[in-house]
Amino acid sequence: MDFIKKNYEKVILGAVLLGLLGVLVMMWFVIQADRDKMQQFANLIFNTRTTPLPDLDMAAEQKSVLRLKSPLHLDLDTTNKLFNPVEWQRAVDGRLVKAERLGAKAAVVADITPLYLIISLNSIETNELGARYSIAVERQNALIPSQRRPQRYYISKGEKNNLFTLLNVQGPADNPTALVLKLADSGETISISREKEYRRVEGYEADIKYDPEKRTFNNRRVGSVLSFGGEDYIIVAIDKDEVILSAQSNLKKYTLPYTP
């Protein structure tokens, strides 16, 4: 007892340390048991065999998509006149004719012809100063009819005019294989010879028929005025596959397609 009385602090401290050690050992077993329990619970959840759900029946939706890809078009104009009643007009001769068969809608493009810029080597003149070349230029799309005929331009190597510059002469000067020209309007470099001319489409002219009045307008160009159906129309554009008319009364434009 004297020993305990003299060393009771050490005895108490030792007992506390032993208790803590026991608690630590017990905690290890508790943690390990908890881990085992959690592992068993996870194995129970994730290893459970389940039956997969059946595929969704999308037949109705697929039919709807197919119907959207091929919509139904109702012709309420040509087969019947439910929403588009026929409009009638009186022709020049007094007959009543459907409006769609009169005016610009009844005009038909019979033909469209391209108009070219044609440049060709016409002749060669030689003298003590060298060779001089006669080059013919035909501008079929010129506004003034007199300018549509071929016009000759005389030029030597290195010279230029308002249409082109003679850059180079290939082969003998008196019998060249080709002349290399640079066009003033586009900057394009072209090559011509006696056997090879240069062609470029610069516009079109059209033949237009108007069957209600048995009239034909041939060789009409942009700016030409056509009178039919009691209305005057101006050709504002011609392309290789269409003609565009503008009514002078209201400036409404009509596109006439061309199918060769």
Image (cartoon, helix red, strand yellow):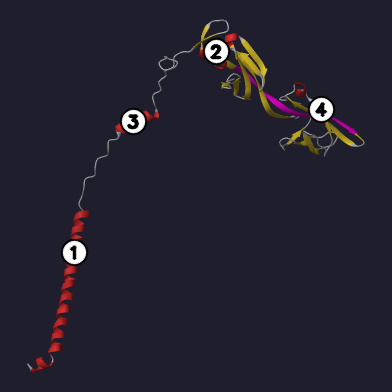
Indicate the secondary structure of the residue bearing disc 2.
loop
Q: CA distance from mark 4 to mark 2?
A: 47 Å
Quarter holding the C terminus?
A: top right
User: What's the amino acid at mark 2?
Assistant: Leu
Residue with the most extreme top position: 94
Nearer-N-terminus badge (4/3)? 3
Q: Residue at x 33, y 33 (%)?
A: 62
Residue found at x 71% / y 29%: 199
Between marks 2 and 3, how big is the CA–CA gap?
A: 43 Å
- In front here: 84 or 252? 252
Residue 250 in the image: above or below residue 187: above
Placement of 208 over or under 116, stated as above or below = above
Q: Are marks 4 and 3 in contact (CB under 8 Å)?
A: no
Location of mark 4 (residue): 152
Disc number for residue 64 = 3
Residue 110 inside the magenta-drawn segment:
yes
- Would residue 59 be found to the left or right of residue 193 on screen? left
What residue is shown with label 1?
Answer: 36
Farthest residue to the bottom: give it: 2
> Which quadrant would residue 183 be assigned to in this image?
top right
- The amino acid pointed to by label 3 is Ser
